[in-house]
Each structure stands twice: as C-alpha cells, then as structure tokens.
C-alpha cells in the first residue's frame, strides 16, 4: 500500500490552517457522532450486541482457515469462483485478467476500501479499462484525483461549492453547461451521468461488508443503491475483499448489520443491504453470468496470532474516526493512508511499513473514545501503544528523543540527584515570567518545543516531595 | 499457489494444521446450527404490534406506507399517486397478483433502461427495521425495482415478519438463498455532500409500500 504517512506533521499543520477543511470536519462530528449517540440510545440491547459481535469475530478468526474454505466451497457450488491474492499486485493482476477475459472496456465500481488499499482503479485505467466509482463520494474524489479522507464518507473534506466546481469542470463536456449549487441538483446530475455508466458497464466490481460461510454469500451495505446496480446490470461481478470479512452464518451477519449503520451514523439499518450468492440462475430476471470473489490477504494473515489480531475484527464502520479528537482536527488526508483515524493508525503500519507510518501511532492522546465506541471492542489505544513500543524497539524514533528518554530513565534511578534536579527546575519555572493566569507562554531551548504549540501551567512552589516533607513536619 | 500459502500462514499463526477433527466438527456444527444471537425487543413483536412497528420504522426512513382492504383499493391508491401522464411498469409477479390498472397507464418495460414507476411484489418484510425483502427470482426483476424513480410494492400483511432471523428461516424453507436478496429500507439516499441526506442517489427517489389485508 502506497502511503505518505511520513509527511504527517507538515500535512496536519496544513490541515489545521485550512478553514474549508475545518468547517467540513465540524459537520462530521456534529452529524455522525451525534447520530450514533442517538441510535445507540434507541437500542437497549446495544452493549450486549457489541459483546456478541466481538465473540463472533474472535471465534471466526480462531477458525479462519476452515471458514474461508467453507465459504469458497459454497461459492463454487453456486457456480462462482474464488481467487486468493497474497498481496496487492497479485490482486490487481487477478482482477485485470478477469476483466480482460470478458473483453471488458468499461467497469463500474461500488465502494470498497480494499480496492483503495490495492490502488485498483489507476491500475485498470493504465490498462485501458475505464473504471468509474459510483458511490457519490468516491465519484467526486475520483474526478478530483484525490484519495478518500474518510472510510465511509470519502468526500467529507469537501464543501458543496467545491463539488459544484468539480462537476462543472467534468460534466460540461457531457452537456451540463450550468454551474449548479443546490445539493439535491448536484446529486441528480451525478445520478444522470452515472446511470449511463451503469447501463453500459461490462464488469461490476464491489467490495463486501461481510462474507457468510454458511451460504457463500457476500453482503453489501449502501444507502445509494449503487451496489445493486453495479452487481445486477453487468455480465460479470467481481467481489474484492479481505480474508477477515467472513462470518459463520446469516444469523451472525444479522448481528453485525444491527451494529454497522448504528455505529457509523446512528441509523438502525442502511437503505440497501444486499445478500448476493453466486451468478444469475434460471429463475432470475437479471444478474451477472460470471461471479468471482477475490480474497485479499495483503498482510492480514501476518496479524493472526499476533498482538494485532484484534484489529482483524474491524468492520470499517468509522465510529473511531468520528469520535477521535485527532482525526476531527486534521482530517483523513493528513494520515497519508486510505485508512485514517485510530483504525488507520493501527492498520497502516501493518499494511505499509512502520518506518513510513510511525507518526500515526504517536498522533494520539490515547483518550480511549475510539475503543469505547468500537462495535467490536477493538482495544485501539492498546494497539497504538504497541506500535509506539515497536517504534522504540526498532530505534525508529529520533536519536534525540532516545537519548532524552535514556537520560530520564537513568535520572529517576538516582533519588538524590533526581530530587535536586527537579527542585532546581521547579524553582526556575516557578519564577519564570508568564501570564497572570498561571501559564508560561514561552521557554527557551529544548523546552521551547512545548511552548511553541501550547502553554505550560506554572508549577506550585516546591516539588511534591518538598511539599510533602513541609506538611508532614507541621503535622508532627 | 496463493490459496495454499495464505492458509498455511493462517494455520501456522494459529498453531494448527487444519486437520484437527475437533475444529472441523466445531465449525460444521456451528454452520448447521443457525444459532440466533440477541434479538432486540423490537424484533420480537407479534400481531398488530408487529404491523405497527413496521409502519413506524418504515415511515421513519421516508418510506410511504398505506394500508388497503384489497387490490382494487390498492390500485386506485397507486393511480392517485402517479403524476399525470406518467406510466407504470409491472413486474411479472405484480401482473400475476391480478391487480387491475388502466391499460393506457401501463408501460411495457422490456430492457435495461431507466423508467419512471415500477410496481412489484416482495418476498416479505421486516417489522424491526421497516425493511422490504426483495429477491432476484420469483418474477420480480431487481433492475426494474432499482432503476425506477418511484417504486410501489404490494405487501400482504401476513408477510410482515418480526426480524431478520425469521427471514432466514423462511429463505431456508423456500430452498435456500437466491442469487440476490436485498433488504430495502427506505428510498435511495446519500449523505456524501456535506453530510446532508439527499434522496434519490441511484435507486428510487420514492418508495411506496401498500400493505394488503389479503392477497
């Protein structure tokens, strides 16, 4: 996976100064997080369902090999086929071969984070296949040549006016000569443009929210209905998904469906939830003749049995992004990865490299909101800490930081020297000039790294030990 | 082959060989058992309460729900909703219900193109979430349903089930999963521009459910 997460610091600084982005992010927390709070309150059994969802995923992961084999067997029994891809280039080539085998020139896509992960669309386009994203948000960012900034709402960083500009620029050649500003009209224009694409497509590519081992079924959840048109109209349907998406039965899938939309935006269910099992049958009025599932590993099997296995429970609901103070401040693009927010900060080092994405785990206050809203109870702060440990163990953090920490750990092993040093520091800071409300705004040298971005609270007079000793004597 | 290398990696990480009889038995039993997980209270209603829950839940999603004594009453309700001069296409299953509509308003839809209005039946419905359950077989063309601007659906009251779990039971009794089974919970919508919900993204802009006392 191509990432630019090594640029997290400059990208997040730019994001904080970007007024348009800041106002878009305000919408996000106001609508999605608030929606979730209400949706959860409406379902008294929510916590019970969370626990069950975690247990179902844990059970499935413990038997992942067997559930994947069962899933494959059922798909084949229905007349479909399953392809296994160890890494992204294998996945891309399998999909290209499948497209070329039916002479495909035009592909429609419904939303899939795995296809973002493997960078599928640019690859198909480089091979002379037109691939059009049909989820409205994905379509907008495809026209703009951008990556998704949110795993559920990929164009959340854009304003209506930016969408209006983009449509005007790209749809003018199709005869849409007027710049429109009304949200409803923008949606209607995209509907009209994409309707033609749906009807002309040779292949439809979708992701999968869940795979059901019992029946060889793939489950797709959308509000727009684009997945249904993507999968029912063309002659070939290719599903691209991760190996961790499998659940045992339809009953198990039902539990996740109850949690997914609620966790994302608070709705009890999305407008369309499709259960697709194999290619067109005799009794069907429509549907594809060919049905393929591409199971992508791309680093997932390495997480099995490791401390990161819990992350494989993730159902990509986005609740952790919508509640993360860091994500809500800098947006998704700063992460430099298609997976952003807390889930992205845990997943990206695994799928790309820790060296390139080491900043992500550090860009967290470890406040724990992500874990508290996660529908499958992934201990995200613990996993972020694990990446920090690995960063230190592999000496990927700056040399100055390592020396500083080593010096500190030596110092706290010397009680006398520690007391003297902190006592001096306390006196210096206590008398340092600053604001009248008890804050120091500017410090020199190394300490300036702190005051550049925030104020330091002025310490009380005397260190803790000094005060303790003073008060202790009084009492005697 | 990648399948083998992926499975080998998964097994070595789980410290299993894939040949353990006990694991196979556990998985096979689990796949056969169809064990239900927790069902919310709203997914456990009966009789009138169930119908009421369906109407509340569907209406909350912007679906228009109405109740009718018979097909004649349903037909006149549909006609009253059709914009003047617009045509209605019927799925084969809708034709088979015997509903009578004036010929001049019927649209003979044969191929995969856009259309204004479509009337179909459904497999069943779910009270908990106010969802319709449509399937790719049984004379209802999915593309017809999803390409229409307005989708009208006939739903016999007795086909309103309590929750998803009961749908799976009905599906198994009817011979297993069809190629496509979709839960339709409201008209098509998108929140992709500034997080505001707009109707009619790709599927029907309007969804009308006509509950029938008998069909």
Image (cartoon, coloured by chain):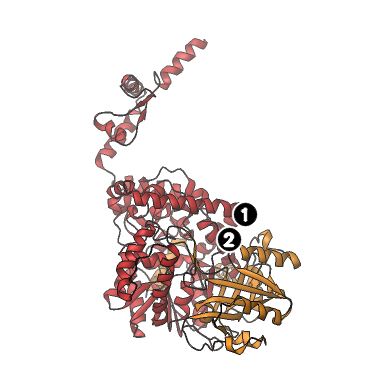
Chain colours: A red, B orange
**Percent position (x, y) of residue A25?**
41, 51
Residue at horizontal 56%, vertical 61%?
A: A56
Q: Which residue is mark 1?
A: A42
Residue at 71% over, 67% down: B51
Look at the image and tell me whether residue A215 can be seen: no
Describe the element under mark 2 as helix, strand or loop: loop
Q: Is residue B91 above or below residue A443?
A: below
- B120, above or below A52, in the image: below
Quarter of the image where the N terminus of chain B is located: bottom left
Residue at (34%, 55%) from the top-left corner? A333
Residue situated in front as seen by the camera: A125 or B184:
B184
Q: Position of residue A318 (x, y in %)?
A: 46, 56
Residue sitting at the far right: B47
Which residue is identified by label 2?
A268
A15 in relation to A472, above or below: below
In this rendering, would A143 be left or right of A231?
left
| Marks 1 & 2, CB-CB < 8 Å contact | yes
Letter of the chain that mark 2 sits on in the rendering: A
Tag 1 secondary structure: loop
């Amino acid at each position: 996976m191509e990432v630019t997460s090594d640029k997290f610091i400059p990208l997040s600084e730019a994001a904080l100064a970007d007024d348009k982005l800041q106002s878009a992010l305000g919408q996000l927390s106001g609508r999605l997080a608030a929606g979730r709070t209400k949706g959860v309150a409406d379902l008294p059994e929510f916590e019970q369902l969370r626990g069950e969802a975690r247990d179902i995923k844990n059970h499935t992961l413990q038997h992942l090999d067997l559930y994947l084999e069962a899933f494959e067997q059922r798909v084949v029994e229905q007349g479909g086929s399953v392809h296994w891809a160890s890494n992204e280039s294998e996945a891309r080539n399998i999909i290209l071969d499948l497209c070329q085998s039916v002479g495909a020139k035009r592909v429609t896509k419904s939303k899939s984070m795995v296809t973002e992960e493997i960078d599928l669309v640019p690859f198909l386009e480089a091979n002379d296949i037109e691939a059009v994203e049909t989820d409205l948000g994905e379509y907008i960012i495809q026209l703009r040549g951008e990556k998704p900034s949110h795993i559920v709402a990929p164009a959340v960083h854009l304003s209506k006016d930016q969408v209006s500009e983009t449509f005007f620029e790209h749809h003018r050649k199709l005869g849409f000569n007027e710049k429109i500003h009304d949200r409803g009209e923008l949606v209607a224009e995209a509907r009209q443009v994409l309707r033609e694409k749906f009807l002309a497509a040779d292949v439809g590519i979708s992701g999968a929210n869940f795979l059901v081992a019992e029946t060889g079924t793939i489950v797709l959840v959308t509000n727009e209905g684009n997945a249904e048109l993507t999968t029912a109209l063309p002659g070939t349907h290719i599903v691209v998904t991760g190996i961790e998406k499998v659940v045992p039965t339809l009953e198990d899938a039902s539990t996740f469906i109850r949690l997914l939309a609620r966790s994302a935006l608070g709705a009890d269910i999305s407008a369309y939830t499709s259960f697709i099992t194999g290619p067109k049958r005799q009794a069907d009025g429509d549907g594809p003749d060919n049905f393929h599932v591409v199971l992508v590993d791309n680093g997932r099997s390495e997480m099995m049995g490791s401390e990161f296995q819990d992350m494989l429970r993730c159902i990509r609901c986005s609740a952790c992004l919508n509640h993360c103070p860091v994500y809500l401040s800098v947006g998704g693009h700063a992460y430099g990865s298609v997976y952003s927010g807390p889930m992205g900060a845990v997943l990206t080092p695994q799928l790309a490299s820790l060296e390139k994405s080491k900043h992500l785990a550090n860009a967290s206050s470890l406040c724990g909101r992500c874990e508290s809203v996660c529908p499958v109870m992934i201990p995200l702060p613990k996993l972020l800490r694990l990446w920090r440990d690995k960063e230190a163990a592999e000496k990927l953090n700056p040399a100055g930081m390592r020396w500083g920490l080593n010096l500190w750990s030596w110092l706290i092993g010397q009680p006398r020297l520690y007391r003297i040093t902190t006592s001096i520091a306390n006196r210096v800071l206590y008398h340092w000039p600053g604001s009248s409300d008890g804050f120091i705004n500017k410090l020199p040298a190394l300490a300036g790294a702190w005051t550049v971005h925030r104020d330091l609270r002025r310490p009380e007079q005397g260190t803790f030990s000094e005060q303790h000793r003073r008060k202790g004597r009084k009492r005697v | 082959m990648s399948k083998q290398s992926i499975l080998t990696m998964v097994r070595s990480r789980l410290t299993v060989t894939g040949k353990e009889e006990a694991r196979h038995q556990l998985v096979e039993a689990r796949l056969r058992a169809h064990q239900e997980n927790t069902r919310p209270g709203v997914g456990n209603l009966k009789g009138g309460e169930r119908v009421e829950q369906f109407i509340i839940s569907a209406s909350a999603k912007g679906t228009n729900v109405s109740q009718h004594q018979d097909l004649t009453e349903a037909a006149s309700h549909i006609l009253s909703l059709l914009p003047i001069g617009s045509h209605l296409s019927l799925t084969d299953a809708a034709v088979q219900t015997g509903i009578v509509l004036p010929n001049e308003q019927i649209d003979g839809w044969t191929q995969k193109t856009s259309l204004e209005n479509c009337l179909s039946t459904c497999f069943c419905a779910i009270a908990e979430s106010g969802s319709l359950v449509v399937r790719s077989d049984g004379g209802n063309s999915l593309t017809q349903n999803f390409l229409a601007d307005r989708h009208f659906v006939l739903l016999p009251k007795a086909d309103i089930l309590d929750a998803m779990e009961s749908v799976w039971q009905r599906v198994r009794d009817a011979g297993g999963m069809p190629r496509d089974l979709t839960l339709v919970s409201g008209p098509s919508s998108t929140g992709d521009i500034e997080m505001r919900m707009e109707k009619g993204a790709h599927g029907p802009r309007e969804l009308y459910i006509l509950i029938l006392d008998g069909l």
